[in-house]
Image (cartoon, helix red, strand yellow):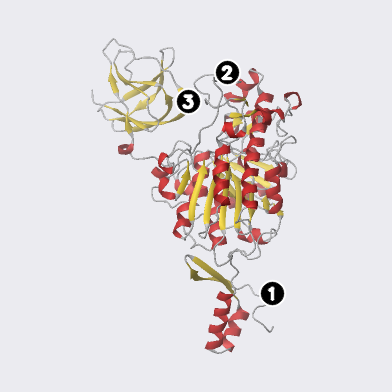
Amino acid sequence: MNGLTSPHDEGKNVRFPFHSGLFMTLKITPSLLGFLHSVSPNSILAFFCLCFICIPVFGGSKPNVLFIAIDDLNDWVGCLDGHPQTRTPNLDRLAASGVLFDNAHCPAPACNPSRTAVFTGISPHVSGLYRNEQRMRDALPRAELLPKSFSKAGYWSGGSGKMLHYFIDAPSWDEYFPPKETENPFPKTLGPPKRPVSLPRGGPWQYYETDWGPIDGTDEEYGGDYAVAEWVGERLSEKREQPFFLACGIYRPHEPWFVPRKYFEAFPLDEIQLPPGYRPDDLNDLTPRGKALARNRYFEHIQAHKQWKPAIQGYLASIHFADAMLGRILDALEEGPHAENTIVVLWSDHGWHLGEKEHWQKFTLWRVCTRVPLVVRVPKGTPGLPAGTIPSVCSKPVNLLSLAPTLFELCELEPSPLHDGPSLVPLLGAGDSDWPHPSVTHLHDPGSFGLSDESWRYIRYSNGEEELYDLKKDPYEWNNLAMDDGSESQLQRLREKAPSKFAKLFEPNLSELTNLTWEALDPHENPPSSSPQGKSFAVRFANRSKRMVELFWIDPQGNPKPYGRIKPGEVKNQRTRIGAVWMVAQANGLKEKRAKGFFRIEHARAKAEIPSF
């Protein structure tokens, strides 16, 4: 065939350094190579010069990136049909203008590991960061985050609101609101004068912020996400010669669900519908591990206090508020000077249960918790996708882990060998492109994961228990097919797609942890009672004595509860809470009244070193 390329040529993409961290990609095909061999060196030089001259760019600049995260948002958005009463007109209009991925999933069903994976491109099963209580900079002290990568490529990198897990990581940003030096990403937010408002405290196990209700005040008086939207909108309205990477973290619908009253009034309580995915007998076909993960005390407590529908109202109101703040940001972009040269990415860090599988909150592998909204809109002339995106819906299984390599390819930054996910660029150009990749979500213990393809979901727990769901027939995962006759071939197909190696749960060195105070006991003295509060976390008990010791939790009534033995020189990880008291005795020491001392838990990132006695 005459000409430079043939439609049947597969060829190979070759990247050439171009300008200030940008690269140009040319597809070198057999037909092109044949053409180049047939002409003179001067003609080849002229050809490549023409290629460089004709690169479509925005007035000589790079594309901007607007990177929007909405916290704890499941599929209760209009364009995903998650709940019939939800109101998300602004998210829907963004989705209608870009590529909506309706089979997108999170790297982990918890804020910290999911957001860490997004900003580093490193999967939890590679980094060892699986849980909220781990610290990103302990596990990944030298990892380069997205804003730093863009800054090094000539961008201004700014952000506002919650992008990482309750910290900013100041060295990664050029500017932040609130100021990055504070390491506090939250502007002042109006709240009720007295708590709890709606849900009484069920005990020390309950997260303090699990509460909801309307706030009397305007959006501006409320602050919080309104202040974030204002700051981001102002940046979008400014003329800039330097391209920008601008991150915006909208905190609602993260708990607590307190937003201005008008957002509650949009959902009359007597009209609230229960979650479409709820089914009363939904746990009958689960394995023991699945049942234990499903049931938690929150849902039973909420039902006991007749707060299920008020809670759903609070979640819908918070989504409606978050969408209104998104609308302010999109309006600022569309009315400002950067409307035609800004890539927009919108995502949520994970989904959320509101009674499905008798569960409340997150931390599971079912679709209601792993499926997230994901929209990518790319303007024409973007180096990595010159034609831009065509409004469409893509149902291929994708993961937020792909956002970093996708942005690198779109903006032609140097690819990172540390990125674990495939770039989404092939799907942005043609949603029907071949896509062999499954989407994998990792639970808090290594080896437990959920895997999604176009039609099936496969869940495997670290103890080997499995679940299998046919999404075409069963989108709410009500029927576990893993034990059914005839499912083995489907199970085997999905097992072959699953990861086989998992990094151990990262634990910081003992030397990096805060020492808890050892308080010795007299022979006839009893330790104080526990007053536990907040969420649980792991504390490391290190036996520095030369004797076997036994660990006891002292309950709120002062009773000792045994929690196992610790050998000399051994370190034991024990989950606990602030305010808990842990007593140490010689092995079998209680009968002999030989309790030696106790620790009171006062820090979340701590060690308890048991001295010699």
- Where is residue 186 drawn, in percent x and y? 50, 36
Quadrant including the N terminus? bottom right
The residue singled out by tag 3 in the image is 534
Crowding at dot 2, Cα within 10 Å, few <14 / some 14-19 / many 20+, comes out as some
Q: Name the residue nearer the viewer: 140 or 54.
A: 54
The residue singled out by tag 1 in the image is 7
Q: Whole-Å distance between the Cαs marked 3 and 2?
A: 14 Å
| Element type where label 1 sits in the image | loop
> Going by the picture, which residue comes out furthest to the top?
524
- Where is residue 449 drawn, in percent x and y? 56, 43
Please tell me the numbered disc located at residue 200: 2
The nearer-to-camera label among 1 and 2 is 2
> Going by the picture, which residue comes out furthest to the left?
613
Quadrant including the C terminus? top left
Residue 572 in view here? yes
Circle 1: residue type: Pro
**Looking at the image, is 301 positioned above or below residue 404?**
above
**Picture quarter containing residue 471?**
top right
**Looking at the image, is mark 1 or mark 2 earlier in the sequence?**
1
Circle 2: residue type: Pro
